[in-house]
Amino acid sequence: MLEKNQIHEAIITDLTAEGSGVCRIDNTVVFVPNTAVGDRLRVKIVKVLKNYSFGISEEIIEPSPDRINADCGVSGRCGGCVFRHISYEAECRAKNNIVHNAFTRIGGLSPEFDEFIPCEETAHYRNKAQYPLASIDGKIVCGFYSRRSHHIVPVTDCALQPRIFADILETLTGYFNDKKISVYNESDNTGLLRHIYLRRGAHSGEIMVCIVARKDISRQLSAMCRILAENFPEISSVVLNINPDRTNVILGERCVTLFGKDSISDTMCGNRIDISPLSFYQVNTVQAERLYAKALEYASPGKNDVLADLYCGAGTIGLSMAHSVKSVYGVEIISAAIENARRNAAANNIYNAEFFCGDAGMIFSELRGKCCVPDIIIVDPPRKGCSEYTLEVIANAAPHRIIMISCNPATAARDAKWLSLNGFSVDKVCGVDLFPRTGHVECVVLMSRQKS
Ligand code: SAH
């Protein structure tokens, strides 16, 4: 039986999506953060639970060959990257295992696994960042939260973000300090500035600056717009988002455009895509195009096929396949994203795609009753996966193929298992890395209707 503060020698055999090493001590699984597969360690037990325990590395007796020197000043303190201490090759091996294990262990499934798709760029690949603001020693700073905390690690030059973001952040925090605008205080819901939210079209280079504040502070930001416009010609949109609520959800519902356009444009799979601040857009554009190419391969659409694109965001996936099918029906819960999707269809001369706002399962169930008899269904839900109701509606629609895209292999495996018990075979799974150096990994799943 393990006890707190004991020290044991152990070898790390696996990595979790949180970036923790896994070892076995006295037949108990122990998670040890910041370690690598093959590390021989002295592990200090810090927390004992019924089925597993947590430890920290006291001493590395023999380091894993996967280890590299972390090339970031705040690595280890900031909660963003969990794999910065191992080679990218080792990270891809770990992520491929995470995808495998999810489908074989959680799902109890045995699909064919396609070769994992790594990302060519492991730095500066993101197109979006949201920085919380804090006042430290009377000075306004921005950064990222350290792991599992609301403590901000100041950082402006994050290695995952476009380089230009650092200059924009210095300009913005300089302005906020000059004007002495107060920073939001979560504990008593006072103060004004909450987050700086930046987006940059990977292909277009267009930049959106969004300031999230508790109240409408448009007047206090007018000189800021002028300074940004003078210094950064790439900035085509400055928006104020108002979030009055006592919540850790970053964005509020209301946006006020302070300068330029109310959305920025980018290109995705050859289509021009407009994205508003509230719309979801994959953060790694180039790799998202590879992900969607895999989804297209799995969908293998024909000219007469009807395609349903559930959880469609700004319509990117459905629109990328619109020319290959008869019609596309997209469903999404955020109305700004649906407006983007409709505009995006028109901007690309796509007339066979319709978009509907509401819950994926509810709206799709209505559509099925009226017009939409899909041959192919694409589902791309958020991390929590699909509700059972949505899965039922999908299964009842009896499409030939379902393509599931997910940023959470565990819920994807759970939902694929449900579908495997309700008329579909889970044929293929492919892991795709959209988030190098972080613990996140995306996967695509091909399912087909069983002809029983
Ligand atoms: N397919 C899009 C978006 C995927 S992200 C793309 O690749 O860009 C998941 C999307 O699901 C988000 O846009 C989110 O707003 C939406 N969403 C979340 N819950 C939903 C629900 N219950 N019904 C419909 N859409 C939902």
Image (cartoon, rainbow, N blue to C red):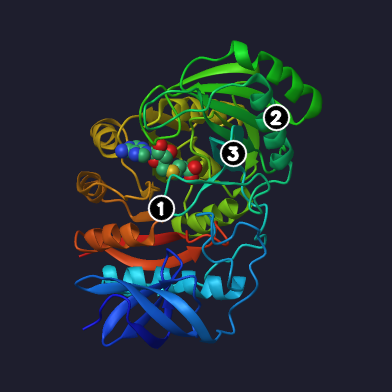
Q: What residue is at 72 percent from the left and 38 percent from the top?
A: 205
- Amino acid type, label 3: Cys
- Considering depth in this image, is 161 or 415 the residue closer to the camera? 161
Q: Which residue is mark 1?
A: 148
Which of the numbered marks, if any, corresponds to residue 174?
2
Q: Amino acid at mark 1?
A: Arg
Can you say whether 450 is above or below 391 in the image? Answer: below
At mark 2, the secondary structure is: helix
Q: Who's the residue at 29% across and 37% down the image?
A: 364
The total number of labels drawn is 3
Q: Which corner quadrant holds the N terminus?
A: bottom left
| Coordinates of residue 125 in the picture (x, y in percent) | 65, 52
Q: Is residue 436 left or right of residue 371?
A: right
Spatial distance from mark 2 to mark 3, Cα to Cα?
Answer: 11 Å
Q: Given the current orientation, which residue lies at the most extreme front position?
A: 137
Mark-to-mark CA distance, 3 and 1: 17 Å
Q: In what quadrant does ligand 1 lie?
A: top left
Up/down of 431 relative to 246, above or below:
below
- What kind of element bears circle 1? loop
Question: Does residue 94 appear left or right of residue 422 in this picture?
Answer: right
Q: Position of residue 452 (x, y in %)?
A: 20, 65
- Badge 2 or badge 3: first in the primary sequence: 3
